[in-house]
Structure formats: C-alpha cells, structure tokens
Image (spheres, helix red, strand yellow):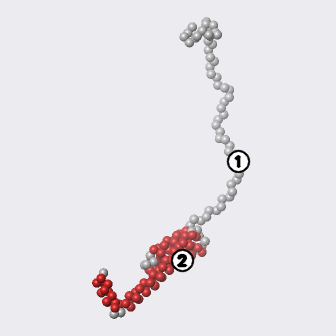
Amino acid sequence: MNEFDNGQNNQPQGSPIPPQQPYQQSPYQQQPYQQPIPPMQPPMAPVPPPVPQGGKGLAVASMVLGIISLVCFCWWYISAVAAIIGLILGIVSLRGQKPGRGMAIAGIVTSAIGLVLMVIFLILAAAGLAILGSMSDAAGFEDFMDYYYYYS
C-alpha cells in the first residue's frame, strides 16, 4: 500500500491501474470566423441641401460699425461715417435675405442711435459755443472770469 491509499481501494493490490486514454479532439471542427450579417435598415430620408453659410459679413460689419458709432459719438467725424456705412450695410444685408438677420437689425438700430446721439451732441456743442460767444462780448464776462479764478 502506498501512503495515499487508506485501504478502501476496490481494486486488488496487484492489479495495475489502467492507463488513461489520450485526449481526443471532438470530431466537430470550428468554422472560420465570419462577420454577422447586419439586419436591413429602412432607407434614410433625403438630406436637405445645405444652407449657405456665407453672407454674414455684411451683418457683422453693420453691427460693428453701429457699436463704433455709439462709442465714438463725441467725435462726430468718426461717428457719422461709421453710422452711415453701418446703416447702409445693415439694410443691404436685410434686403438680400442673407443669414445674420439679427445682427443686421442690431447694426441698423445701433447705427441709428449713434447717428441721433451725434446730432444731439453737435446741437448741444453749437449751443454751448454760441452761449460762450455771447458771454465774451458782454461786459460782465471779464468780471465773471476774474471772480472765478480769484476764488478757485
């Protein structure tokens, strides 16, 4: 008896253990790998033609010039040129049915507001210069200036 045998072996001691049969492959052979066939999909709807992306340049330029006319309304020579060109570009962009409608409207509005502010500024400046001119001819202007410089 060997050390692993506890005496309960059903085989007689003298009989050898039959050798195991060698591993045999099953008769089934594996098929070569193939891609599964995808299920048929319904046909896709026709794709609409692409919307032209160009043409926003006039609207953007109108809006930028309108903002410049708002910011620079005190410098009438800059504001007037920017506002007039901004108005023209905004109107051309709207008439052409080009993309950027919102920016074209914003350009027209800002250009118009800049033009109005520039006109108001010019009127106030002319009125102020007229008042100062009339005060310089008056006899009391020199007294006013002397008083102003003396107490300030």
Q: Secondary structure at mark 1?
A: loop
Is there any visible trace of residue 50 in the rendered image?
yes
Q: Position of residue 126 (x, y in %)?
A: 43, 86
- Left or right of 103? Residue 142 is left
Q: Quadrant of the C terminus?
A: bottom left
Q: What residue sits right under mark 1 in the picture?
A: 40
Q: Residue furthest left?
A: 150
- Left or right of 132? Residue 9 is right
Residue at x 62% of width, y 17% of height:
20
Are dots 1 and 2 in contact, CB under 8 Å? no
Q: Quadrant of the N terminus?
A: top right
Q: Does label 1 or label 2 sit earlier along the sequence?
A: 1
The answer to which image quadrant residue 35 occupies is: top right
Residue at x 54% of width, y 77% of height:
88
Q: What residue sits right under mark 2 in the picture?
A: 88
The answer to which image quadrant residue 55 occupies is: bottom right
Residue at x 64% of width, y 9% of height:
11
Density class for disc 1 (Cα within 10 Å; few <14, some 14-19, many ≥20) is: few
Is there any visible trace of residue 89 in the rendered image?
no
Q: Nearer the viewer, residue 105 or 51?
A: 105
Q: Position of residue 29 (x, y in %)?
A: 66, 30
Where is 116 relative to 11, above or below? below
The amino acid type, in three-letter code, at marker 2 is Ile
Q: Nearer the viewer, residue 47 or 99?
A: 99
Q: Residue furthest front?
A: 151
- Left or right of 80? Residue 132 is left
Depth-wise, is mark 1 or mark 2 nearer the camera?
2
